[in-house]
Amino acid sequence: MRMVGALRTKWRDKVMAGWVLSRVLLVVILLVPVYLRLGILGDVKLYEEWSRILVTGHLPGDDPSWQYPPLSALVFVLPRIFGGGGVYGFMFMLGALTVDLLVLRMLMWKGRPRSGAWYWVAGIFLLGPIVYFRYDLFATAPVVLALLVISRRRIFGTLAAVGALLKVWPVLLLLAVPRSRAAVQTIAAFAVTAALVLAILAGTVDGAWGFLQQQEGRGLEVEALAATPFQVARSFGWQGVCRLRYGAWELVGPGIATAATASVVVNLVAFVLLAVAVWRHAPRRWTPAFGCDAVLAAVLVAVVTSRVLSPQYLIWLLGIGAVCAVDPRTRQRPVLVLLLVATALTQLEFPLLWSDVMAGKGVGTAVLVARNLILVAATVLAVARVWRGPAAEAAAAPEPVRDERVEGLALSGPGS
């Protein structure tokens, strides 16, 4: 037992050392003036403007860029409360760095297989410093914790609701629920948590549902998969331009509306196929690993069929992918490799080659096309593996019986 404990401590030390070294390098990159001029701080400046409105008890629902559920207000306000207006950006970065470390500790919790922790360390490093200047890391953290306790139905449902109230996409976690009586507990916990939080927010802030109107009016962002053919066509005379709308650079021109509609149709078809795949294997062959695999496939479908594919969306995939890597029964390991490649290409296209992407030419556009094709391949592979069901050895064994008292203690903090 002492030897096992020593080995656990050793790999934990290595992971922490890797995290510290990689994050120091990310901060060093930020000190390079040319990198800061590439636009990664633009969103934080917008968050700071919103925080001035939020502290008055109102949501910036009239701002076309505001597209976040009401609980997100807490994340945007805290840097102002703790640091004041003068150091808002620094406090936001510090908060994001803290959440990054918390996610790592979750993945290291109770001596879990180290592959998940290393995956998170590597993935965030490959995406670059933009991670600490975007909101999405805060929405990903409750998703990671929810998937790590996926067999505890009520806690899972509560965390899924918190994630969905921070940013809508975590509602896809409900796809991981097996078709059984346990699903009722999860959905009930989700509904009660969401209703309670929304009731509290309705009494304290105005304009809680303004973000839904802004979502309806969004166009096709230049990095989205559906925009990729038009990006290539720009080099061959396609008459289209980029315009800043709803907080993102969108393509405007012939065929864009049709492509946006087609992406919605593809989204619906892919989700139907995925839902059928999950239904086929639940509850008889359902396992926690299968649930996590299904969520990764669902979020990949959401990302590649979205009208917007911002670099920070990769944070969602990295978080879910890290949880999949924790469980040796996952079938998504080839998908996880593709995601790391796509993540590295994402940092190249934004911010390093962003001028090429905006112009629709050069190396930047080639990198964007390659990134999107890899994401398509990852999505098709992820859905196909969910369709095939859990791994054979996992399907043959029933889900392990869990000691609620032990897990309750485990939730109090990372194991040593």
Image (cartoon, helix red, strand yellow):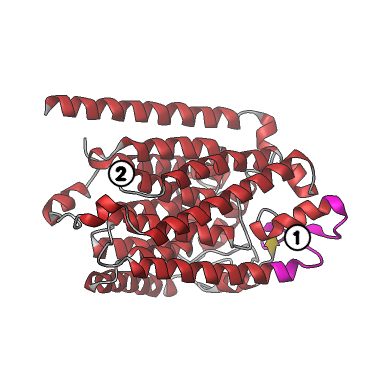
The quadrant in which the C terminus is found is top left
Label 1, secondary structure: give it: strand
Q: Is residue 111 left or right of residue 75?
A: left
Would you call the spot at circle 2 few (<14 residues within 10 Å), some (14-19), or many (20 or more)? Answer: some
Q: Is residue 278 left or right of residue 377?
A: left
Q: Over which residues does the magenta segment extend?
A: 235-259
Give the number of callouts. 2
Q: Residue at x 22, y 50 (%)?
A: 411
Comparing 403 with 139, the one in front is 403
Vertical side of 170 occupied by 48: above or below: above
Comparing 151 with 199, the one in front is 151
Comparing 329 with 248, the one in front is 329
- Name the residue carrying label 2: 328
Percent x, y of residue 217: 66, 71
Q: Residue at x 20, y 55 (%)?
A: 397
- Name the residue carrying label 1: 251
Q: Is residue 250 left or right of residue 161?
A: right
Q: Quadrant of residue 264?
A: bottom right
Percent x, y of residue 129: 56, 38
Comparing 79 with 406, the one in front is 406
Vertical side of 190 occupied by 85: above or below: above
Q: Amino acid at mark 2?
A: Pro
241 inside magenta stretch: yes
Q: Residue at x 52, y 27 (%)?
A: 25
Mark yes or no: residue 285 visible.
yes
Q: Mark 1 near mark 2, Cβ–Cβ under 8 Å? A: no
* Cα distance in 3D space between marks 1 and 2: 42 Å
Q: Amino acid at mark 1?
A: Leu
Percent x, y of residue 255: 78, 68
Label 2, secondary structure: give it: loop
Q: Residue at x 65, y 66 (%)?
A: 64
